[in-house]
Amino acid sequence: MTWLTANVLDPIRSRLFYKMLIIYSLLTLIPLIIVSSTFYIRSSLVIEKKAAEEAQQRLSGTADKFDEVLYAVKSQMTPISENMFLQSLLRASNQGRKDEGLNASVNVMLQSELATAKLKIGPFVSGIYLLDEDGLVYSTDSRKRLLYPDAFREMPLEFDRMPEWAFFNDDRRIACVVKIFEEGQRPSQDSETGRLIVTLDTASLQSMFAAFKPNMFYITNSDNQIMSASDVGKIGHLLDIRDSVKEIVIRQKSRYSEFRYVLLASPGTGGLVKQQALFTVGVTLAAWVAITIVTYVILRRITIPIQRLTRLMRAAEREEYQPITGITTNDEIAMLCNGFNSLVERTSHLIETNYKNELLVREAELKAIRMYINPHFLYNTMEYISIMSHSPEKAKHIPQMIHHLSGIFRFSITPGNAFVELGTEMEFVRKYLEIHRFRYGDRLSYSIDLPDMYHKIAIPKLLLQPVVENAVVHGIDRLPEGGTIAITVKEVQYELVIEIENSSSDEEADGENGNLALRRSRGLGSGLENVNARLRLHYGNTYGASLLRQEGTTLLRVVMPIQMLQDNEGS
């Protein structure tokens, strides 16, 4: 057995011809096995995924077209609701007066708006209606009245002057409603004089989704009630998809209403099977080409590694240490190359050990500081929202506050860049202060003085958030009458200076100016130390933040070099 191994296997290990024969056989057999197995395993998954992607694209295209109609209707309703003739008619109607001339003017105006809507939006705009306080209906078509005028009068709207789509059908029509208020009066229940309604005919809307098979496309409201479908008999009923086990159910929400677009797609297989067959042929041809290239490369590996090794050894004599790469064999040439690489690695390691260790320490410190900021800020903001939710007056501002918070959080968790433009950072600060204005109301006012010439200056991301938070929590929050936060950006002796000045109580005036240790004992030092630590890590000990206490105010000054943001700046 030992004799057989020595006489048969050893020549294979050292002779290139036998190596090529074995490699060629394996590279021919393995791809064919992989292709055959992959075809049957991937077929069902690829077919279903492809069908779902195509259906999603078709649904998105139809949804975009329908959303364009919804948006166009809402856009046209706003100027109509502000028409002075229409408001005069509602004022006279609510006061019990009738003006035939005014009625005629409004009728002409509404007919003109309806004709314009049909021309610009489409023939599915069926009518325009006007409701006064008593529920009287002014219609562009007296033959087709509203079935549920009282429902439109009592329908709750989220916004006062913004049109909103009704969550119910009126005689198989989709309706958009907007409040009309007394001219010059603030929106309120007392100043509301009527409501304007524009309807869309669901039968005409079927032309927008005629490309789908019957009973495959539906428009529903948030309660899963069908608002439009190819079968008008299903309008007004709940959509039941429990029996659609063979279809792919795809949903998409409208951008301009609470409507949902639902598509029941059947996965097709014919075209995809042909694609899989072509895939198999392509992989086989690619495998054959790859085998030819590999055979050619193996032959060249006899001389090319030796030439490369010679050049690298001459470079090593000039103290330029570079390892040889691309060696994947285990023959004698590979052993020689690996020995040279080991020598290069050991030499380079001894030279670069101290430098790399220092960089790793500085990088770890910087990442630790940045990881502290995001959860700290998010926790405080969620606490503010929790407090506001207990106050009816403040709770109505929570949606807008969450909108600001989502923008702030999206900015703070975006990976990749350690530096941002000063203008972007200041917009983050503005959103942060806007959130606090919802909490403090008139107690908090602020100003930001950022000249245009400084917008593109590079600044460490989230640098200003801790100090602005200190200004709010330890300044404005402690003053019963509130105060002001003023942020100023300027250049002093070719350096960037950012000053954050806020009102503060006189009880803290006994503290030593600029003493960060003292401020930390009172709960302010953590944020300021983070700012100083980040500035020192990026720019050196020359730059940092200083705190100045004055009577009734606190001034924080951040000094850093003026540098423009580079495209390749990263964390």
Image (cartoon, rainbow, N blue to C red):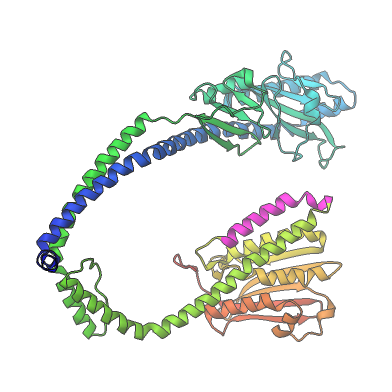
Residue at the top extreme of this rendering: 143
Q: Position of residue 94 (x, y in %)?
A: 87, 27
Q: Is residue 103 above or below residue 303?
A: above
Q: Position of residue 401 (x, y in %)?
A: 71, 54
Residues 335 and 104: in front is 335
State the image quarter where residue 186 is shown.
top right
Magenta stretch encompasses residue 47: no
- Which segment did they paint magenta? 392-413
Q: Residue at x 62, y 56 (%)?
A: 407
Q: Position of residue 391 (x, y in %)?
A: 83, 53
The residue lying furthest to the right in this view is 96
The structure residue drawn at horizontal position 67% and vertical position 65%, both measured from the top left corner, is 377
Residue 374 image offset from top left, x and y in percent: 62, 65
**What residue do we see at 77% from left, 22% from top?**
148
- Where, quadrant-wise, is the N terminus in this rendering? bottom left
- 364 or 170: nearer the eye? 364
* 341 in relation to 132, above or below: below
Name above or below for residue 525 compared with residue 48. below
Please indicate whether residue 124 sits to the left or right of residue 513 in the image.
Answer: left
Residue in view at x 23 percent, y 75 percent: 338
